[in-house]
Image (cartoon, helix red, strand yellow):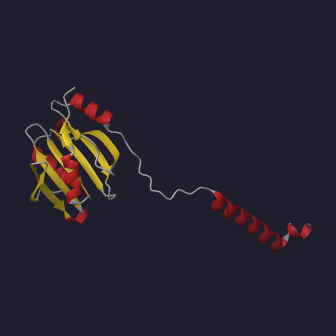
Amino acid sequence: MRRFTEGFYGYAVALFVCLGAAGLFLLVAPQGREEHIPRRDYSITVANFGRTVPYQVWAPQQDPAGWIPNSNRIAKGENGAQVLSIGYATAKREHAMLLQSDEKPAAGFASRMANTDKAIGGQQVAGQTWERRYREDKKQRTLVRVLPDVTLVVTGTADWPELGELAATLQQRPKS
């Protein structure tokens, strides 16, 4: 028995036993092969935002099919205005985000969120015209809609139809 615990032969046997045990563990341990994107409920954030702003908040009536809401927050914008953001992983697993604020000037807010001030046309969404912006180096597409009391921005790496799909779900929530 002494020869299994001494010298190179003992070391090789111990190494083989450890590798065999690790291999057996990896063979029998469950391994998830599905992607996991954390889902974040934004309903409380939207309700809290609605209590702090002087206008009716816009939010998705329901999430687009296959989309996963994965972030939401209320932040301070310029001049003390509040900004609501709701982020998604789209059905194509790109990124899309809804941002809204009553920050003035509206054009400044839209340009900061889009990372560009250059419009490249318009897009019809649910009977409304949204301004398109594109920043090529970031592959960032943005739809902007400036209303009298709030600016809506839908932006991300998602393609134009997906951004339009998110914009089409937006409805004003009653003031609470």
Q: Is residue 176 above or below residue 164?
A: above
Nearer to us in this view, 90 or 7: 90
Corner quadrant of residue 156: bottom left
Give the residue at x 91% y 67%.
2
- Looking at this view, name the residue that lies furthest to the front: 65
- 2 sits left or right of 168 in the view: right
- 26 sits left or right of 99 in the view: right
Give the residue at x 31% y 35%.
43
Q: Position of residue 130 (x, y in %)?
A: 11, 51
Q: Position of residue 137 (x, y in %)?
A: 23, 65
Nearer to us in this view, 135 or 63: 63
Give the residue at x 8% y 59%.
121
Give the residue at x 14% y 58%.
133
The C terminus sits in image quarter: top left
- 44 sits left or right of 79 in the view: right
The image shows a total of numbered marks equal to: 0
Corner quadrant of residue 116: bottom left
Q: Position of residue 75 (x, y in %)?
A: 27, 39
- 96 sits left or right of 129 in the view: right
- Looking at this view, name the residue that lies furthest to the right: 1
- Looking at this view, name the residue that lies furthest to the top: 176
The N terminus sits in image quarter: bottom right
- Looking at this view, name the residue that lies furthest to the bottom: 8
Q: Is residue 83 above or below residue 24?
A: above
Q: Position of residue 54 (x, y in %)?
A: 16, 30
